[in-house]
Amino acid sequence: MFVVRVALDIPVPTLFDYTVEDAAQVGQRVIVLFGRRQLVGIIMEVAATSALSADRIKPVVQVLHDSEPLSANLLDLLRFCSNYYHSPVGQVVLLALPARLRSDKPLKSKPAYRLSDGIADFEPLPVRQVVARRILDELAVHPCTFEQIKALSATAGAQLKRLVAAGRVQSFIHAPARISAAPHTFSNAHQLTPEQEAAVDSVRSAAGYGCFLLHGITGSGKTEVYVHLMDDALRRAGQVLLLVPEINLTPQLENYFSRRFSGVVLVSLHSGLSEQERLHNWQQAQSGAAQIVLGTRLAVFAEMPALSLIIVDEEHDSSFKQQDGLRYSARDVAIFRARQCAVPIVLGSATPSLESYHNAQTGRYRMLRLTGRAQSGARLPRVSYININQSVMTDGISEKLLREVGVRIGRVEQSLLFINRRGYAPVLMCTECGWLSDCRHCAGKMVLHRNENRLRCHHCGYQLRVPTACPGCGKAGLHPVGSGTQRVEEVLNARFPDARVLRVDRDSTRSKRAWNMMREQIHANEVDVLVGTQMLAKGHDFPALTLVGVLNCDSALYSSDFRAAEKLFAQLMQVSGRAGRADKPGDVVIQTAFPDHPLFRCLQNHDFEGWAAALLVERQMAGFPPFVFQAMLRVEGMNEPEVYEYLNLARASAIKLQHQVDILGVVPATLARRANHVRAQLLIQADTRRALQQFLRTWKPLLDALPARKLRCQLDIDPLEF
Ligand code: ADP
Ligand code: ZN
Ligand code: ZN
């Protein structure tokens, strides 16, 4: 009889003891009874005895053998996350796994194929069996999935089955980590620029862990640096983890990297996959069959036995931070993971987060700079401003910008109007009585979606038909205030009836297919003017695009979120980078009421350094990150007094601890009510990460002991949202 300590998805910070008959292994999945429920757990420890008395300890229902045990390395990483984010260890462990591994239904894993061990004893196949020979050649390089084989030829599926029946090829579910330094073809497209070369050399010469910040303007060839480093790692039979922010970018990137590394097995991991696909890809990473793992934040928890390089592209992107449940930062976890595995990590961005930038300046990370565009001839766009207080405007667009768009249409070049708001107008108002389209369930406004004739709350999803008369006074004086993408589209259609206008936002791209078709249209030059949200700002390369117009971004300049300006600068830099990537120079025109704001001046000069320096001075004076470290206690509940009482008790218990931390006041969240839940928060700050963590370790048990029956309480470490 052995005792195993099992991680379960239960919100208490402990492991649970069970007994097993036969020796079981750490990392194995087990089915256990918890109360009356049957749960899947992970064995975290094996022990000889338990503190529980023999009659209270239950036997494990079943030890599952249909998956490989998790490695000690991964379990360490998850334990670290549990400690750092102050989340129950069992929940962290189970959250990190693909959903299929969390369920007690037997796994139907998809097999992969490889050459049989006895292949050398077979006669070579006759030459005329072209397809079968191609399959064997492919498998000689690396194991393949059925899909990969099928892609070789129309008859490859049938041929593969014949080869398996003949014993030349074996199928397997869990490949033993057989990572071979199989020759892959690396298509080396370019002669590296001296700056790229220097960046590659720096990372190459890192022995073991090193964190590098690759700061390169858009178009400076960061991807080329990644590719060269990846090639290095693959040659040494290593696996590469590449984290990217946006899910809609992954198919594109998957194609790109597959093309650059033919013969390499690349899998992706993101929330757009089916459970089965995700399990399959995860297991490919775990077995070592997948050499490149490309994914969004959740991929940081992929099991990779031969991990030898991590790249985080667009490291400043806030989508690396999970905003509910386990509020982890995939970038920060990746850095910990790189250190744990003693491998280099490269954080790439044109506009690094101030945290990373500060770390690079103070020597914790190494700074690598790419200051010029990689393609000779490609120039940075010209940035100019239109003062909206001194311009003739049509529904939020200035005449001057409309003229510029007209000029581009005449030249058969593309323009992009960027506005970070979907829908027709952010609010509907009654000009008679001042009624506003407030959401009944939230503290926010309902957005007018004129195409569907609906008012829709973007916070809780509540929707209504647009009222014909004012619900307040009954008069017919309802008017849309402000603009969203649909309104801009309407203005453009009215002004340029012959132009092809395409709106790209979350409403128009609900299906993956719609978005793919749009991308093709854009590339085939079947679009004259694009209207889009930040979806369009990221990573896309539209060669015919020569004008970017930015509408309505001033609100970030007076936001209560101290990071709003930092984010706006990054966004504008990114969207500006879309203009004039090929041989045509680009123009960026920004409409603002504050053309003299330092943000706009730095943007005009493409001066990230100047901007960052100014922001850092401000942050230091105000005592904000990266000069302090923060944790936010967020509480939500139906009953306002309960929410505030909890937070006040929490605050009192924090003060009593007398730690070296600042305990701020209890305040409403920026969105003080969402879906009928009152939301409030309490911010804690400390001068060092260590001081903050020490405080949290003593405070968390007190929090857990407070009465909070119907409240949702979350501790958010290094919060990004305020
Ligand atoms: P970033 O990721 O920094 O925005 P990319 O890696 O996409 O930049 O590179 C921008 C363009 O420059 C791409 O079309 C790429 O093929 C090209 N490029 C990259 N490196 C070189 C190089 N050394 N010589 C010529 N062209 C290059
Ligand atoms: Zn009214
Ligand atoms: Zn709402």
Image: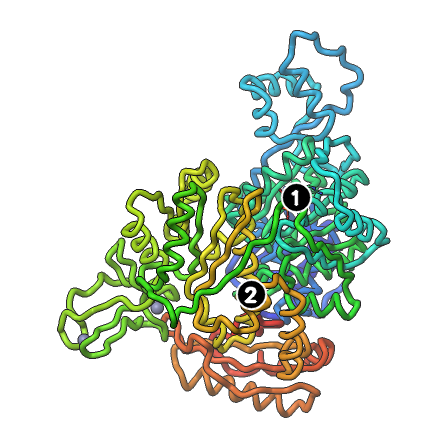
Mark 1 surroundings: few (<14), some (14-19) or many (≥20) residues within 10 A? some
**Which amino acid, mark 1?**
Gln
Q: Could you say where residue 470 lies in the image, as x and y percent from the top left?
A: 18, 71
> Dividing the image into four equal quarters, which quarter contains ligand 3?
bottom left
What residue appears at the point 72 percent right and 41 percent down from the top-left corner?
288
Task: Give the SS element for disc 1.
Answer: loop
* Residue 77 placement: quadrant: bottom right
Q: Does ligand 1 reach within 8 Å of label 2's beta carbon?
A: no
Q: Does ligand 1 reach within 8 Å of label 1's beta carbon?
A: yes
Circle number at residue 191 = none
Q: Could you say where residue 594 lies in the image, as x and y percent from the top left?
A: 47, 73
What residue appears at the point 71 percent right and 54 percent down from the top-left corner?
370
Q: Can residue 67 be seen in this view?
A: no
Above or below residue 278? Residue 84 is: below
Q: Which of marks 1 and 2 is in front?
A: 1
Q: Is residue 308 left or right of residue 401?
A: right
Looking at the image, is mark 1 or mark 2 earlier in the sequence?
1
Circle number at residue 375 = 1
Q: How is the image coloured?
A: rainbow
What residue appears at the point 77 percent right and 70 percent down from the top-left corner?
362
Q: In this view, does 637 lie to the left or right of 20?
A: left
Q: Which of 318 and 354 is in front in this view?
A: 354
Q: Nearer the viewer, residue 523 or 343?
A: 523
**Labels 1 and 2 touching (C-beta < 8 A):** no
* Residue tagged 2: 569
Q: Could you say where residue 52 lies in the image, as x and y percent from the top left?
A: 68, 69
Above or below residue 13? Residue 499 is: above
Above or below residue 307? Residue 554 is: below
**Which amino acid, mark 2?**
Phe
Q: Nearer the viewer, residue 159 or 207?
A: 207
Q: Could you say where residue 529 lies in the image, as x and y percent from the top left?
A: 40, 48
